[in-house]
Image (cartoon, grey):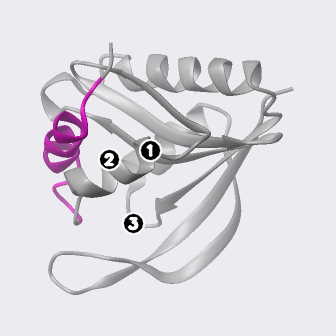
Amino acid sequence: MSLSADELAALSARAYAHMEPWSARAFAGTLEQPGHLLVGEAGGFVLGMVVLDEAEILALATDPAVQRQGLGRRLLATFEQEAAARGATQVFLEVAAANAPALGFYEACGYRVTGRRKAYYRHADGSRDDALLMCRALT
C-alpha cells in the first residue's frame, strides 16, 4: 500500500504526540529523493533512505489505536528486507533518549546504541532531548 505525504503526516501526528511531527511537505520532499524507501499500510509506516550499503530509518510510526499488535515489528522487518535487497548491509536510526518504549522496541529488534547527539530533539514545550544513534547489521 502506498501512502501519500498527507497520510504520512496525519499518521505521524497521531503517533508522535510527544514531539513535533513531520509536515506533509517534509514527507513529500523525502519521497522525491532518490533512494527513499517507504514501507507502509493503513496503520503504520517506516520511511528511510538506502544509499550504497547503508540504510537509515528516518521515521517509523504506528497509529496509537493499533500499537502493540506486531505491526511496527512487521513493517520494520519488511523495511530491512527491502533495504538488504537494495544492497544495504546495515541500518541506522536515531531515537529520543527519553522515548523508553521506542528504545525498548528497537533493542528487542536487534538494534544497539552506538552514539549520542546531545539536545538533538526539540519537544513541543521547548525542552530538548538527546538522540541515541542505533545500528543493526543486516548480514
Residue 89, picture quadrant: top right
Look at mark 1 in the image and give the residue it sits on: 32
Specify start and end residues of the magenta stretch as a single range.
3-19
Element carrying mark 2: helix
Query: Residue 16: where, in percent of width, then height?
Result: 23, 52
Residue 9, picture quadrant: top left
Give the vertical position of 50 relative to 82 (above or below): below
Q: From where the camera sits, is residue 22 visible?
A: no
Task: Indicate which disc, 1 or 3, sits on the residue closer to the N terminus.
Answer: 1
Residue 17, picture quadrant: bottom left
Give the vertical position of 139 relative to 25 (above or below): above
Mark 1 crowd level (few <14, some 14–19, many ≥20, 10 Å Cα): few
Marks 2 and 1 in Cβ contact (< 8 Å): yes
Q: For the image shown, how many numbered marks are present on the structure?
A: 3
Task: Indicate which disc, 2 or 3, sits on the residue closer to the N terminus.
Answer: 2
Query: Residue 123: where, in percent of width, then height?
Result: 25, 75
Along the horizontal axis of the image, is 83 left or right of 32?
right
Query: Residue 83: where, in percent of width, then height?
Result: 68, 27
The three-letter code of the residue at mark 1 reads: Glu
Along the horizontal axis of the image, is 12 left or right of 96?
left
Look at mark 2 in the image and give the residue it sits on: 28
Look at mark 3 in the image and give the residue it sits on: 98
The three-letter code of the residue at mark 2 reads: Ala
Element carrying mark 1: loop
- Quarter of the image for the C terminus: give it: top right
